[in-house]
Amino acid sequence: MDEFQAWLAYERIEPFADIRADMNAAHMVATMINMWGSGKGKAIGLNECLLKFGGTESKTDDEMQIEAMKITAALGGRIVGHG
């Protein structure tokens, strides 16, 4: 039982499960956007990149594609090969 308690204590300090993998991914996305973003001086925060769970709103594929194109344009990106 002592070994199990030690692993629990270690996991509290250094989580090794994917409990908040969404937060880790959002942190990486925010970092990349801020490094390679539009350069307009506005930093993107972690909450802006964090997935929102529990919403009931559903979008079609076309609506999601339009939204992605808007985000790309807002960040100074270029859309290639859209038809």
Image (spheres, rainbow, N blue to C red):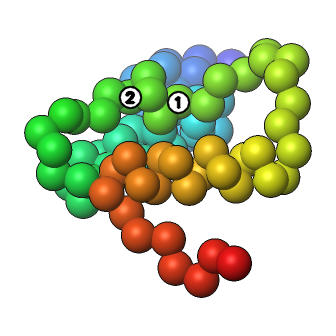
Q: Examine the image and state in which quarter residue 48 appears.
A: top left
Numbered disc 1: secondary structure? loop
Q: Nearer the viewer, residue 58 or 15?
A: 58
Q: Does the image show residue 28?
A: no
Q: Examine the image and state in which quarter residue 46 appears.
A: top left
For residue 34, which numbered disc appears in the image? none
Q: Does the image show residue 67?
A: yes
Looking at the image, residue 49 lies above or below residue 71: above
Q: Residue at x 24, y 46 (%)?
A: 34
Expressed as whole percent of the image width and height from the top left, the position of residue 64 reads 73, 47
Residue that numbered label 2 is attached to: 46
Q: Residue at x 87, y 44 (%)?
A: 60
Expressed as whole percent of the image width and height from the top left, the position of residue 76 reads 31, 57
Image side of residue 21 versus residue 39, left or right: right
Residue that numbered label 1 is attached to: 50
Which quadrant does the N terminus fall into? top right
Image side of residue 29 versus residue 3, left or right: left
Mark 1 neighbour density, 10 Å: few (under 14) some (14–19) many (20 or more): some
Q: Nearer the viewer, residue 8 or 61?
A: 61
Q: Residue at x 34, y 50 (%)?
A: 75
Q: Are marks 1 and 2 in contact (CB under 8 Å)?
A: yes
Image side of residue 69 versus residue 63, left or right: left
Q: Examine the image and state in which quarter residue 16 appears.
A: top right
* Cα distance between the residues tagged 1 and 2: 6 Å
